[in-house]
Amino acid sequence: MSKILSYEKKDTWIHELSGVTKLLFFLLWCVVSMVSYDTRILVVMVVLSFIIFRMSKTRWQQVGTVFKFVLFFLIMNLLFVFLFSPYQGTEIYGTKTVLFHIAGHYDMTKEQLFYEGNMILKYMTVVPAVFMFLVTTNPSELAASLNKIGVHYNVGYALSIALRYIPDVQKDFAKIKNAQAARGIEMSNKAGLLQRIKNVSAILFPLIFTSMDRIDVVSNAMELRGFGKYRKRTWYSSRPLQRNDYLVIVFIVVFTIAAFVITFWDGSRFYNPFV
Amino acid sequence: MEPIIEFKNFTFRYQSQKEPSLRDICLSIYPGEKVLIVGPSGSGKSTLAHCINGLVPFSFPGEVTGELAIAGENPKELGIFGMSKHVGTVLQDTDGQFVGLTVAEDIAFALENDRVSTEEMHRRVLEAAACVEVEGLLDHAPGELSGGQKQRVSMAGVMVDDVEVLLFDEPLANLDPLTGKRTMEQIDRIHREKNKTILIIEHRIEDALCIDVDRVILVNDGQILADTTPNELLAGSLLAENGIREPLYITALKHAGCKITEEQNPQHMETIELGEMKTSVQEWLKKTKQPELFHRADSILRVENLSFSYEKGKNVLADISFDIKAGEMISIVGKNGAGKSTLSGLICGFYTPDQGNIYWKNQDISALSIKERGEKIGFVLQSPNQMISKPMIYDEVALGLTVRGVPEAEIKERVDAILRICGLYPYRNWPVSALSFGQKKRVSIASILVLNPEVIILDEPTAGQDYRNYTEIMEFLRAMNQRLGVTIIMITHDMHLMLEYTDRALVVADGKLLADTEPASVLTNEELANQAYLKKTSLYDLAASCGILDPTEFVKRFIAFEREERRKQDV
């Protein structure tokens, strides 16, 4: 389980990029994908996403489970959009081309299909980008990157510390859960739901107390080694930007501007093939 | 020469406490000295360390009177960050103080905070790592390291800053004995090569004295009781009087009626001049009784050909077999990560074995759930904080019965009975938070005993405890073993515990059962002790030096004698 969506060291130009570059790319890419309903741009982005995804040599095992999960949500999302507003597409595009009647006041329209098709495209542009950012960025670089784009190092380091201690807390949790189960405090489905909720406290309180002890040690250890001494700090794992980094940054900035220009050329964020 | 650390009539009281934790301390430590600070829990030795590294008064506020100078400067003016430029601290919790995601980042932490450039940082990290021989592990995550390696990383993390003083807070607390010995040797090497001032806080004096130190400072009740050479301290009786365990060879010599003097150089077993004392030891051996043979009862827990792996192909345990008899006190020993905890997890049903069977009174128990096994085999975690979930003592002990739906009246009866046996009855309506560590430990054991298990397994019952707490916990367990007839299995790397309180030791190393024998035999067999990351006991060397032909027998008699003495005191 711990291996899913976690960083894996590989030898590709994407892994070589600095964390800052990837963070910038990831943020701008998501902004474009969220704002734009321009099908032409979305199609280009999907194609690019999949090309980059292939180049990063990400294995299916790393992301498969989460991808299926996302797919499930996508399908639910599409279904609910149709159930609650079957004429959203018609409203947006201003025409109504009924393909066939379903039942009651539900008609399948070309516009709705097109609208929901765009939603699928949006998912498909963002999801590979998220995956890639996570599996190709060394978590050590994350804090440094956040700090470089202007986030205070306290925030970046909090993230780093969380990543550092999550496995330890997981270990504590398993230990406590097992010991309490041996005392008869069961969390498995043999116990009723109400009982289970009550039993959670038998694991949660010891876990919280153990974690508090740990926080004491960690904060003392950090203070003793000068954390918070200055308003700025440097990072062992920050990498200087290379030629490829500049190329990617230039590309994503140009791409973002171009995408916005094309999207809003006609004054709306929707590309309308129906008029 | 100017002292690098100087206390003058220094008194400190924590804001939350009425009485001062340190009283009228006068102490000078000079550059390049190697000083051992000893004292029982609550003696003030940790507070003393906190004053030196600046946690007092900057993180733990309180009232200071008198003077303290670090490198000639006033801590108040330096602040905690200024102090950290002079004094580097290695804490005892090897996991907690590892703040980096990888070894390199952890070592670099102080430099990052000091805004050192990335290139310079890489150079200095490599240098510091090489100094403690972890340069091959730079991109490893803490989860991939052993306790000893983590500790070396922490050392590199303070040395990277080129501090003058290195302060080690109980460096041996979380390590197995052999790793502990290597740590002490590492500290000694740093002292020689880098010419730092070294302060070591420890109460395991025999283990700490495996290297030469210039001075030992004994702290108790917030005061300095002795500031002298190890030889003088060991010759006197101050250690024993203040709840510090003397080295075993010293205790043995004292039992034999020897008067140890400073001139005999008693600081190491290797250096002590025994002279006349050899005959006294031999005489004493003749007077001691042969230990009573243990009566083997019926099998209560039998393990046959047990194998287990978390990942396919990587056996954590391979082909383990042993048989535990009812009423035994037994220890499972071996280095950290050798599979001891996994073994107890298999017995309790937390994991399912790949191969092999576990029998309870000759009945296969593979079909029983964790809960069902828990009624026969209780499991107690290392720290009581990991188990206690109720604010009141009574409720905590009753919890296991409440969830099983036992009627209220019966719960009260059983809980009261167990609280009486455990000596907790007077506190039954107290909040858990008002108890000492030893009492909390008793509560966590009582909450298991109330289920009437016939076997209890304890994970590291005395880890990190001083001699007084250790004795309290272990005497309690022995009493439970005798009064209730509970079979007690302890996972430990404490050699004293295994030697003094258990009749049999299972030695596990690299997933295999290396030995199933008497503890005295494990600690007198150098090869076996090394494989299990234990150390040969100094009693063995003493016996050998005194010309005793069967040193193992000597160790056994010593232990039997000690038990007898302790029992006399109880009556």
Image: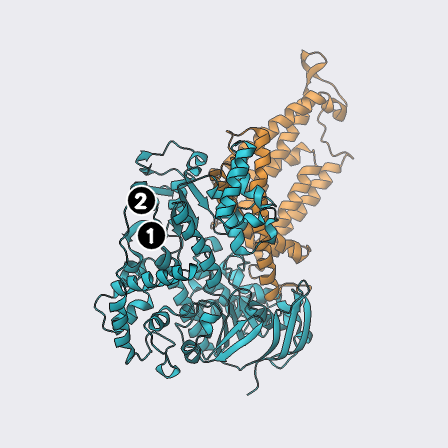
Judging depth in this view, the residue of B225 and A63 nearest the camera is B225
Chain appearing in cyan on the rendered image: B
Q: Looking at this rendering, what residue extends furthest in the front direction?
A: B571
Q: Looking at this rendering, what residue extends furthest in the right direction?
A: A267
Residue A45 on image: x %, y %? 61, 38
Badge 1: residue crowd in 10 Å (few <14, some 14–19, many ≥20)? some
Judging depth in this view, the residue of B286 and B382 nearest the camera is B286
Considering the numbered disc 2 on the image, is that residue within a helix, a strand or a loop? strand
Residue B500 on image: x %, y %? 36, 59
Q: Can residue A137 be seen in this view?
A: no
Same chain? Circles 1 and 2 = yes
**What's under tag 1, amino acid-wise?**
Asp
Q: Looking at this rendering, what residue extends furthest in the bottom direction?
A: B1
- Provide the residue designation for mark 1: B510
Q: Residue A168 carries which label?
A: none
Judging depth in this view, the residue of B434 and B292 nearest the camera is B292
Give left or right: position of A160 versus B311: right
- Provide the residue designation for mark 2: B325
Q: Is residue B19 above or below residue B375?
A: below
Residue B370 on image: x %, y %? 44, 36
Q: Which chain carries label 1?
A: B
Badge 2: residue crowd in 10 Å (few <14, some 14–19, many ≥20)? some
Chain appearing in orange on the rendered image: A
Q: Can residue B260 be seen in this view?
A: yes
Residue B286 on image: x %, y %? 24, 68
- Who comes first in sequence, dot 1 or dot 2? 2
- Quarter of image, res B350: top left
Q: Which of marks 1 and 2 is in front?
A: 2
* Residue at 67% across, 65% down: B18
**What's under tag 2, amino acid-wise?**
Lys
Give left or right: position of B419 versus B542: right
Q: Mark 2 lies on which chain?
A: B
